[in-house]
Image (cartoon, rainbow, N blue to C red):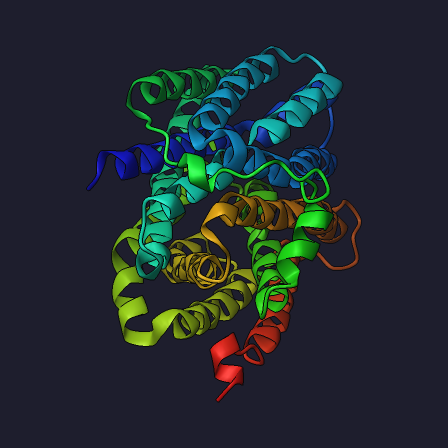
């Protein structure tokens, strides 16, 4: 594997470790800061996640555009530095408002995913991009294997310990990148920053004018909106449905991350070869619908663990969609495209935490008429069915000419 590819995979993996480290302690941390019950903590968790996503949604196209103009290297290193400092702020936070401020800064700095994907597009032939985007997903999955396990373990030393560990990982990644990251944006491919397109609405409008892209952007958004049920309510769902401890929540997330890594690194290539990019998207949606339904209705923690590898098979969807779209835009717009895709996933995280945690709270609050912690997963199943109905009517531009 080329050193540049290794760096990008490691970058995403360490970023995911930072996220996974803190998920197991979020319910306890919010309860500690707010002196709130679990249902109220879930609502505050939704507010924090949504704040992070709003900032990411608003700033990702700008950061992607800046990487097209000034290069991937400075954007990656600056973003990672700010991210490390943000974890320090959150580790020291003594109020919910400081946690909220930390999420504002963290969301603005969370451009590494879009820039890493643009970097991968720079160094990969168009026909190989979907598979290599899968490597990015694999790095994220491996990070989620290591992060939640470490987070659950560190939680034994207090709710702040995982944040200090996340800060150290991000800082270490900055040092590593300083020495090994090479610039990939050639002078002839650099383009001026268009402030009219440096916002999510302008960028979507511009890319949406390309044949077939608008519908795919909607499908991509709906995938992330449904999939966001996992980070939005998994900790609260596990505690309410199965009385899981932070270490058990971390272990379940690690199992999911391991399955995602196997899918992204090992399974996606033969699936792409067998079904093509369009068929791969449909392949993933079959498993997505089935697992959302089953997770929503089962009451056994063991059964949930068995379902985890099946749920991970949906992870082939975003890489295949990215591969399709990246072949439809110019080489000097890859950063802009990845910024828009990051904004699409961020917009999903603007909406999903509030919707999913509110749904969870409505069905788990004291005195609720129907106690049903799995309700958010059935909602995700319905969103997935909408995405499938849109995608099956999509045709590539050359197919429309046949």
Instruction: Tell me the quarter of the picture where residue 187 sits.
Output: top left
Whether residue 240 is visible, yes or no, is: no
In the picture, measured across the screen, residue 377 lies left or right of residue 140, that is right
In the picture, measured across the screen, residue 351 lies left or right of residue 60, that is right
Q: Position of residue 95 (x, y in %)?
A: 72, 15
Taking depth in this image into account, of 319 and 384 the one nearest to the observer is 319
Taking depth in this image into account, of 180 and 380 the one nearest to the observer is 180
Instruction: Tell me the quarter of the picture where residue 99 sits.
Output: top right
Q: Position of residue 41 (x, y in %)?
A: 70, 33
Taking depth in this image into account, of 364 and 162 the one nearest to the observer is 162
- At horizontal 62% and vertical 55% (from top left) the residue drawn is 225
Q: Is residue 31 above or below residue 234?
A: above
Q: Quadrant of the N terminus?
A: top left
Taking depth in this image into account, of 11 and 63 the one nearest to the observer is 63
- At horizontal 50% and vertical 20% (from top left) the residue drawn is 78
Whether residue 298 is visible, yes or no, is: yes
Q: Position of residue 345 (x, y in %)?
A: 59, 49
Residue at the bottom extreme of this rendering: 402
- At horizontal 42% and vertical 16% (from top left) the residue drawn is 171
In the picture, measured across the screen, residue 329 lies left or right of residue 263, that is right
Q: Is residue 43 above or below residue 358?
A: above
């Amino acid at each position: 594997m080329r050193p540049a590819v290794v760096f990008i995979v490691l970058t995403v993996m360490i970023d995911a470790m930072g996220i996974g480290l803190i998920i197991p302690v979020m319910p306890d941390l919010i309860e500690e800061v707010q002196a709130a019950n679990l249902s109220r903590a879930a609502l505050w968790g939704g507010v924090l996640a949504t704040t992070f996503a709003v900032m990411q949604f608003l700033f990702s196209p700008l950061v992607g555009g800046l990487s097209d103009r000034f290069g991937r290297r400075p954007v990656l290193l600056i973003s990672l530095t700010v991210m490390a400092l943000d974890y320090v702020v959150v580790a020291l936070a003594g109020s919910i408002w400081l946690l909220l401020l930390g999420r504002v800064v963290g969301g603005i700095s969370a451009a590494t995913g879009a820039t890493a994907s643009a970097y991968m597009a720079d160094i990969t032939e168009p026909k190989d991009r979907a598979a290599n985007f899968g490597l990015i997903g694999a790095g994220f999955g491996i990070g989620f294997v290591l992060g939640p396990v470490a987070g659950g373990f560190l939680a034994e030393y207090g709710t702040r310990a995982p944040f200090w560990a996340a800060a150290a990982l991000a800082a270490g990644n900055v040092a590593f990148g300083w020495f090994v990251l090479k610039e990939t944006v050639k002078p002839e491919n650099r383009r001026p920053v268009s402030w009219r397109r440096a916002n999510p609405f302008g960028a979507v409008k511009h890319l949406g004018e390309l044949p077939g892209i608008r519908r795919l952007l909607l499908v991509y958004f709906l995938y992330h909106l449904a999939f966001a049920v996992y980070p939005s309510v998994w900790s609260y769902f596990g505690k309410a449905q199965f009385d899981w401890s932070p270490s058990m929540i971390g272990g379940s997330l690690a199992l999911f991350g391991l399955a995602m890594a196997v899918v992204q690194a090992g399974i996606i290539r033969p699936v792409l070869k067998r079904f093509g990019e369009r068929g791969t998207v449909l392949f993933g949606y079959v498993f997505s619908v089935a697992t959302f339904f089953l997770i929503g209705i089962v009451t056994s923690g063991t059964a949930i663990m068995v379902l985890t590898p099946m749920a991970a098979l949906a992870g082939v969807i975003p890489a295949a969609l990215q591969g399709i779209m990246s072949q439809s835009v110019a080489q000097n717009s890859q950063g802009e495209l990845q910024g828009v895709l990051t904004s699409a996933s961020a917009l999903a995280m603007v909406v999903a935490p509030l919707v999913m945690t509110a749904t969870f709270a409505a069905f788990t609050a004291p005195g609720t008429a129907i106690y049903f912690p799995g309700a958010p997963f059935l909602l995700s199943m319905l969103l997935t069915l909408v995405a499938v109905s849109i995608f099956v009517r999509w045709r590539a531009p050359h197919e429309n000419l046949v």
